[in-house]
Image: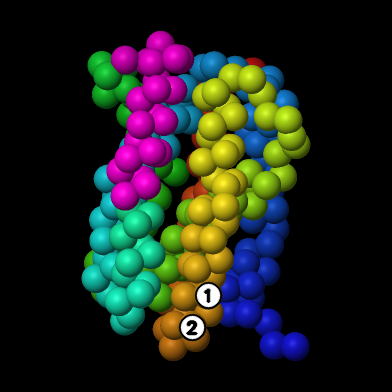
Amino acid sequence: MTLRFSESLRQACAVHWTRAVEHRFVRELGDGSIGDDVMAGYLIQDHRFIDSFLVLLGAAIASSDRFESRLVLGRFLGVVCGEENTYFLRAFDALGVDVDARAHVPDTAPTAGFKALMREAAATRSYAATLAVLNVAEGLYLDWAQRVPRPLPDNFVLAEWVTLHDNPMFVDFVAFLRAELDRVGPGDAARADDFFRRAVDLELAFFDAAYADGHA
């Protein structure tokens, strides 16, 4: 049986993909042992992605060749602007991270790199390029979230970060992204492969960076 295009990209990055979805951060998030300082630092950095991520989603909507696909992408854009952004604000309140504190924390190198990659993909005006980055940004998160044992920790900051990335709507959206990449990716295969590989490398580096400041 012919391997799906999206799956061939993932398998080519299997070592780093697996290291990311089995990362210490994921294990400690799942068992509730992650430190508040680690989680706060991670969420500050992850929240920085939203602006560039909206640029990426907007580019995917603009470059898509199907009205039906634009509708799916547009609905997800609404989730990011609504439910997900609201989670961040609630989590920051719970962790005692105010606006000034968030503003004075610099981007880590992986954060800056991923923001640049999303905007680079958007600037190509290639649907395949935007889908390659989206398949990593969302597909890798679904993969790790589905590996987290249940029941989830009582702390909503931890539990809701998992359920935001493992719920029926999100599962369907990742399946849509994979199908779209399978459909259009082979027509721009080299570019899709390049963006996919770089995105996986940055995801792993992003998890590593959560512990880079000496957090225990």
Write the residue at 63% across / 44% down.
145
Instruction: Report if the CB atoms under discs 1 and 2 are less than 8 Å apart.
Output: yes
Tell me the quarter of the picture where residue 112 sits. Answer: top left
Q: Residue at x 44, y 61 (%)?
A: 134
Q: Based on the picture, tell me whether residue 123 belongs to the magenta stretch.
A: no
Q: Is residue 177 visible?
A: yes
Q: Position of residue 66 (x, y in %)?
A: 33, 80
Q: Which residues are magenta?
A: 78-98
Principal SS element in the magenta part?
A: helix
Q: Is residue 171 above or below residue 103?
A: below
Above or below residue 127? Residue 80 is above
Q: Residues within 10 Å of mark 2 (few under 14, many from 20)?
A: some
Residue picked out by circle 2? 183
Q: Residue at x 57, y 56 (%)?
A: 171
Quarter of the image that includes the C terminus: top right
Residue 95 x, y percent position in the rendering: 45, 15
Q: Look at the picture and state if 112 lies above or below 77.
A: above
* Residue name at image x 59 percent, y 19 percent: 155
Q: Residues within 10 Å of mark 1 (few under 14, many from 20)?
A: some
| SS at badge 2 | helix
- Label 1 sits on residue: 179
User: Is residue 24 in sight in this rendering?
Assistant: no
User: Element at badge 1?
Assistant: helix
Q: Is residue 85 magenta?
A: yes
Which disc is residue 72 wearing?
none
